Image (spheres, rainbow, N blue to C red):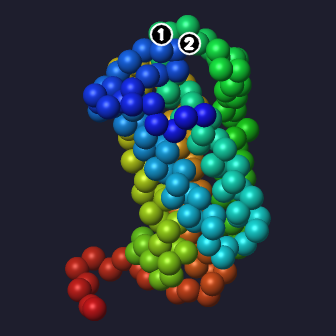
Amino acid sequence: MKIYTKTGDKGKTSLLGGKRISKNNVRIEAYGTIDELNSHIGLLKDQNIDLYSKEILIGVQNQLFTIGSILATDPEGRFAKPKIEKNNRGINIPELKETDVFLFENEIDLMNKLLPEMKWFVLPGGHPFVSQCHIARCVCRRAERRVIALSEESFVPEIIIKYLNRLSDYLFVLSRKISMDLKIKEVPWRPGERKM
């Protein structure tokens, strides 16, 4: 597999299906942000957090590759089917399922049973692991916005937006769990306070 092809030197790239579009296209921005999110999830996973959360995050990374593949497919091209099966390179592109979303909901519910009740907004931070979790959450929200923008001009499976929405919720609750595991005190947002 050759890394550089020189085919993008003039600012265009190919979708799965062959269509050439600008690298500034909303579709490229959407799956590019998914790729950025995947890298942040990888960095979070590489921190010294519990092994169970690491396993969940590896699964998330795999699903984000699936989302990127779906978004990189020309919705009007030869691979545009309700169920993308096999392209001419022999790559199988799986689907997202509702169970992928339910996984986040179950994990959120389990973590919330262990966490103190949330009575205020909390400031991101307190520890580099917690901060990395919040960065991933923010990039996830941006990815969700980019995918919604794409969905307003082209077909995007609804499950992708739902998945990203629930993933950002999961990352927020995970940040709280990491704070608890590390015995880091959450800092509440106090409007107007300027203490250093």
* Disc 2, SS: loop
Q: Residue at x 58, y 65 (%)?
A: 44
Residue type of the residue flagged with mark 1: Glu
Q: Residue at x 52, y 20 (%)?
A: 16
Residue 54, quarter of the rendered image: bottom right
- Say if mark 2 contacts mark 1, CB within 8 Å: yes
Residue 91: x percent and y percent? 69, 25
Q: Residue at x 71, y 64 (%)?
A: 53
Q: Residue at x 64, y 41 (%)?
A: 63
In the picture, which quadrant includes the C terminus?
bottom left
Label 2: how many residues lie within 10 Å, few (<14), some (14-19) or many (20+)?
Answer: some
Which of the pair 187/42 is nearer the observer? Answer: 42
Quote the CA–CA distance across marks 2 and 1: 6 Å
Whether residue 129 is situated above or below residue 27 in the rendered picture: below
Kindly tell me whether residue 118 is visible in this rendering. Answer: no
Residue 41: x percent and y percent? 56, 57
Residue 25, quarter of the rendered image: top left
Residue 88: x percent and y percent? 64, 15
Residue type of the residue flagged with mark 2: Ala
Q: Residue furthest bottom?
A: 196
In the picture, which quadrant includes the N terminus?
top right
Whether residue 86 is situated above or below residue 24 in the rendered picture: above
Label 1: how many residues lie within 10 Å, few (<14), some (14-19) or many (20+)?
Answer: few
For label 1, the residue is 76
For label 2, the residue is 80
Whether residue 62 is situated above or below residue 44 in the rendered picture: above
Left or right side of 148 for 83: right
Residue 68: x percent and y percent? 54, 35
Residue 123 badge: none
Kindly tell me whether residue 35 is visible in this rendering. Answer: yes
